[in-house]
Image (spheres, helix red, strand yellow):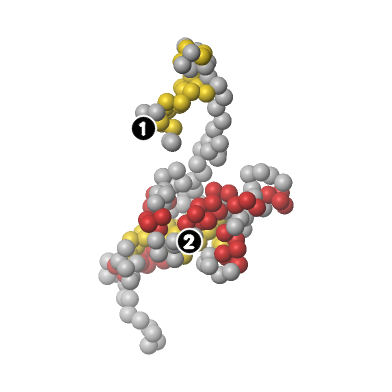
Amino acid sequence: WDAESVGRDSGRKAAGASHGGFIIQSSQGDTMRCGRLIVATGYAKEASPGNMQGIEHTVGYGEHSMDLDVYENRSVLILGMGNTAFETADYLGAVTSYIHLASRTGVPRWAWETHYVGDLRALNDDVVDTYLLKSLDVLGGGVDFGDGTVALVRRPDPITGRESTCLEPPHHAQALKDVAAGKLDNTPRFGH
């Protein structure tokens, strides 16, 4: 049930009772009325490292597909190490071939250490076991999202040919573009 619009109820009688609260309209046309409305969807604004080169290649949390077939045997990079990032990694972990969690700090802030409910709670840290048991490939990696030290680039997988988004230093991204354009010699060196 996804809410498409929320408005104030004028207090008119509906089904014999005056609500005077909220009217929620779904995208399917269903209507729900309530006296109290609690919005528990996380922060009011989705955090996005807007200065990061290549951020336009990413899919935000509110836009990513919940269809697990989309992620079957794919590599997934999750930017962030909060509750939402870990919930997403846990959800996708059974079908992906590789999950990488990255954040500015490189480590999660644990709520049991900080006593802040917004930090990673034990309820959402099940995916840490997969890292400790070598199923989650990477947990960590300090990423400075705005100073040009890393970039997100789109490139085809050399085996499958499917385009994917990769996290790497920007000079690697430029080197890949130069090789593709024939500007750099890509001949293996030293017999490799």
Q: Residue at x 37, y 32 (%)?
A: 27
- Dots 1, 2 in contact, CB < 8 A: no
Residue 94: give its label: 2
What amino acid does circle 1 point to? Gln
Specify the label residue 99 is tagged with: none
How many marks the image carries: the answer is: 2
Tell me which residue sits at (57%, 65%) in the image: 131
Write the residue at 46% across / 65% down. Answer: 98
Relative to 177, is 77 on the left or the right? Answer: right
The residue at 60%/67% (across/down) is 132
Q: Is residue 155 left or right of residue 144?
A: left
Q: Earlier in the sequence, mark 1 or mark 2?
A: 1
Q: Secondary structure at mark 1?
A: loop
- Furthest-left residue in view? 182
* Pick the front one: 187 or 77: 77
* Badge 2 amino acid: Ala
Neighbour tally class for label 2: few under 14, some 14-19, many 20 plus, Cα within 10 Å: few
Residue sitting at the far bottom: 191
Write down the residue under mark 1.
28
Quadrant placement of the N terminus = top left
User: Mark 1 to mark 2: distance in Å?
Assistant: 31 Å
